[in-house]
């Protein structure tokens, strides 16, 4: 299937990725892009919008979080079957990464992830708990591979959402995890930080085995607080390093 030919105007650099998202959503709303249509290549979009390819990747990632586009096996990014009206409402929530305060993000994650943990604890089967335990064991083998660990960390939280069984909470948690990962790329390069997260995950599983949803909620909330603290510390260290570099 060939990519759809689109009328695309160049955009300014300020907030470039968000503007790319808005432009592509406008094309969906206008009917220029419809369900199943294939987007132009990353390189072509970058040329047409006159932005960098990383900017296009960030925009596509945001659209994927919203469920607007999907990547198919064999390559290519395609428009999903969602209606434009379904995706325009929550847009501002998902696309505020540059302006987002890390404290506000993790305040929201604490509430959402805590509830998911409690629901999942109440619903989890023995097989579910065994699967989560295996995931944590695999995480423990990747403490020296931060990128791989982050994939397994995302998988762990996604599995909790699936077990919890609430698709609205699952979508909110998934989206906040994607946004939070941009911060965590700064923080989760340390084996000590990764090790602490794994300990937190094991504490959540202790509550699951005890069939104690409130304990699971508390364990998850402790995890979110620990993540926030280590993320703050890493961001502060990065800022200090930049300052020292400018003064050198």
Image: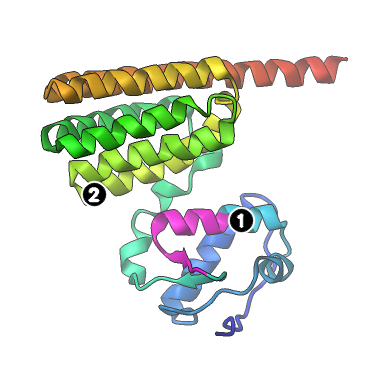
According to the picture, the residue beneath numbered tag 2 turns out to be: 168
Image quadrant where one finds the N terminus: bottom right
N-terminal label among 1 and 2: 1
Q: Residue at x 20, y 32 (%)?
A: 115
Q: Residue at x 36, y 62 (%)?
A: 87
Q: Work out which residue is located at the far right of the displayed protein and give it.
A: 248
**Residue 102 counted in the magenta span:** no
Position of 231 compared to 136: left or right? right
Residue 112 appears in the picture as rendered: no
Q: Is residue 87 left or right of residue 240?
A: left
Residue indicated by mark 1: 57
Residue 38, compared with residue 105, is above or below; it is below
Q: Quadrant of residue 126?
A: top left
Crowding at dot 2, Cα within 10 Å, few <14 / some 14-19 / many 20+, comes out as few
The percent position of residue 45, horizontal first and vertical second, equals 66, 68
Image coordinates for residue 197, horizontal then vertical, percent: 42, 21
Q: Quadrant of the C terminus?
A: top right
Let me know if residue 8 appears in the view: yes
Q: Nearer the viewer, residue 50 or 167?
A: 167
Magenta extent:
59-73
- In the image, residue 30 sits, relative to residue 203, either above or below, namely below
């Amino acid at each position: 299937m060939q990519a759809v030919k689109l009328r695309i105007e160049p955009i300014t650099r300020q907030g470039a990725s968000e503007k790319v998202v808005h432009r592509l959503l406008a094309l969906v709303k206008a009917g220029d892009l419809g369900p199943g249509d294939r987007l132009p290549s990353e390189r072509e979009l970058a040329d047409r919008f006159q932005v960098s390819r990383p900017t296009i990747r960030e925009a596509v990632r945001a659209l994927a979080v919203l469920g607007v586009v999907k990547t198919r096996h064999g390559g290519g990014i395609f428009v999903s079957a969602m209606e434009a009206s379904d995706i325009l409402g929550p847009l501002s929530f998902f696309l505020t990464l540059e302006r987002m305060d890390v404290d506000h993000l993790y305040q929201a994650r604490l509430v959402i992830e805590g509830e998911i943990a409690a629901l999942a604890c109440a619903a989890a089967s023995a097989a579910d708990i065994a699967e989560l335990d295996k995931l944590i064991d695999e995480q423990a083998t990747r403490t020296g591979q931060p990128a791989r660990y982050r994939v397994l960390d995302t998988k762990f939280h996604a599995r909790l959402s699936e077990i919890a069984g609430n698709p609205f909470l699952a979508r909110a948690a998934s989206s906040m995890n994607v946004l939070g990962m941009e911060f965590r790329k700064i923080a989760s390069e340390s084996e000590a930080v990764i090790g602490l997260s794994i300990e937190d995950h094991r504490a959540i599983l202790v509550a699951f085995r005890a069939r104690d949803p409130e304990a699971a909620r508390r364990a998850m909330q402790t995890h979110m607080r620990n993540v926030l603290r280590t993320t703050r510390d890493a961001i502060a260290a990065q800022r200090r390093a930049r300052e020292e570099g400018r003064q050198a």
